[in-house]
Image: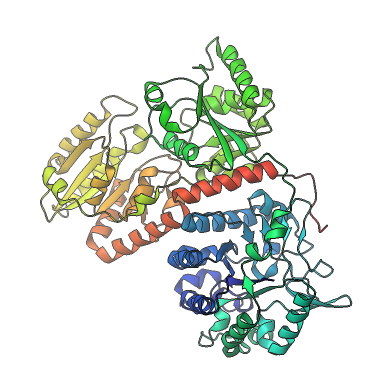
Amino acid sequence: MNNALSFDIEDWFQVENLKPAIPRETWNELELRVEANTQKILALLRESGAKATFFVLGWVAERCPDLVREIDREGHEVASHGYAHRLIYEMTPEAFKEDLLRSKRILEGITGKPVVGYRAPSFSITPQNLWALDILRESGFEYDSSIFPVSLHDRYGFPGSDTKPFRWPNGLLEIPLATWRVGKLGLPAAGGGYFRLFPYWYFRWIFKRLNRRRERFTFYLHPWELDPGQPRVSVPWLYRFRHYVNLHKTEPRLRRLVESFPFSSITTAYRTELATETPSRPPRIRVTFMIDQLDSERAGTENQLLKIVRGLDRQLFDVNLICLRDTPWLEENRDSINCRVDIGHLHKLTNPLAITGMLRLVSLLRGTRPDIVHTFFPVANIVGVLSARLAGVPRIVSSRRDYGEWMNLRYVLATWLANHFVDRIVANSSPVKALTERKENFDGRRIEIIYNGIEDDSFARIERDEPLKKELGIPDGDKVVGIVANFRPMKRHGTFIRAAAEILRQRRDVVFVLVGVDAAIEGLRDSMRLLAESLGVGDQMRFVGSQQDVRRYLSIMDVAVNCSQREGLSNAIMEYMAFGVPCVVSDSGGNPDLVSSDVHGLTFPLDDHVALGDQILRLLNDPALAKRLAENARLRIESEMSLPGMLSRYRSFYQGLISLDTSTQSRPT
């Protein structure tokens, strides 16, 4: 019989006992010891052959992605401990969900595997905040291990709860921490501070009796509990006692424990309990995606949709795609989409035949009977939603991926009508979510943020393409500042060129590369060329048009720029970050969601070409700063916005949507 071994991966300064002395805003300034301490645990488990579940704090995973990969690589389970180690009963449901999903997104982005288990910081799911269980279930979690049925603790406890695994009414499996019942009193036996405070024989005695009764037990520790050399801080005596008592005894006691009892991860130890839930949905979820048209595989929304369509696991999902109108690109590439593709033959809302087209869509949806319809682009977000409603589709999802420059009053009213039949809206950034709340008066609690995804090979280091510099006539020693953006007014190329003029007044060893073609207004690219000539910087500009392999150009850039006015989540910025190119971006649209100033890159006020020039010069003049920001940016993209992470997030989102049951109040059964 395997018992469940688990570790809550957080650092010494993130513990609730030390909270009075260590403000959260100082965490980045403190010594990071969690990696070395977790390595002690991994080495000990290798020696014993035991496996475990590691409930990893998202904040830690963000800074130590290689540690998370090693945990996964060695056959242990990676689960979530939330992102910022906040007590759930001190958060609103909205804040908890945001914290939870951020952690899940980071962990799944690192491992490329679904994260199905959760443990609350300080076991902070109590009888007063059972609403958290529905959010866990809705977010795709299969089990929770936050219930500690102990008595007489000031911070946590769930007296009277079952001590064996049980299911909540919403289907979520609960794995309680080990206790020993004496009448109605629950004595702690799960580990943590108790393992350091009580004698070892106490635990051995309880665990042997539990196993003799054919009951598994769930045990936990923290990495900092194996670290007697950690810094000491001044806190009230009770907190100091809880945190520092017998730290030197933890590692030898843990070694004795894993040598005396068989241990595995939670999902292995309780595999029978996890598998016993009666399925409430078909083996595969039928998802139909609907979009106005597909003109290209490279444009932002189309690119992301095709990644989702091709990447969803076909063992879990049956995927169909409906395009409201045909295009030459679709005719040529239909076979590569990897699913059934139907054409709706619906071109405009104002077309007299729009009603006929919508009725065809209703008939098509009734024939394919999807569990979920997910729409993209303005017409599909209206007609597709209404058609799905008329066809009786159980769950309808809409998308918002930009700032709706196309959305005139007619579209706003029609979208507002369609939104009455939408279960969820998926936005690709926080600002787009906020705009949707404000402009469409849509409940923010029903708006999901799922970031765009970048392919794995995008994280590969790229060698500087020196021959390309020669092709472009750029001297060997000159710096290259680039922008990747098709020419449209919102991209603000004029700001980039005016900033170039400011920079060239201070140093002449800089060349500016503009990758892109006219996308909205014919001749805009030529007008930007004329602007550069009028400012006297035409010789330092390279207008290179559209490029099949943008990576060649990114490889020669010392700084990459985005000046956009209103953009949901820029794929170009994500590519800058993924390839390790230090970037300067406008503080507009979804850009701040990607780049925190002086953390992942630098920002400047929209249309302020002087400020943009100053920020570019900061990076050109300070290589150490440029390197640090680029590394931070790369780690963020890799951990939060990888393609496997995005696909895992959509998988969890769709599964949670199907299993969502908000009509039942959660309580133990």
Q: Residue furthest top?
A: 352
Q: Residue at x 53, y 19 (%)?
A: 344
Q: Residue 330: x, y in percent?
A: 41, 25
Q: Is residue 237 visible?
A: no
Judge left or right: residue 472 versus residue 112.
left
Q: Residue 90: x, y in percent?
A: 68, 63
From the viewer's perspective, is residue 75 above or below residue 229? above
Q: Residue 425: x, y in percent?
A: 59, 38
Question: What coloring was used for the rendering?
Answer: rainbow
Q: Residue furthest right?
A: 183
State which quadrant residue 280 falls in.
Answer: top right
Quarter of the image for the C terminus: give it. Answer: bottom right
From the viewer's perspective, is residue 642 above or below residue 125? above
Quarter of the image for the N terminus: give it. Answer: bottom right
Q: Residue 11: x, y in percent?
A: 53, 74
- Nearest the camera: 575 or 531? 575
Q: Residue at x 31, y 47 (%)?
A: 561
- Total numbered labels: 0
Q: Residue at x 26, y 39 (%)?
A: 515
Q: Is residue 523 visible?
A: yes
From the viewer's perspective, is residue 275 above or below residue 367? below
- Nearest the camera: 509 or 499? 509
Judge left or right: residue 140 versus residue 618.
right
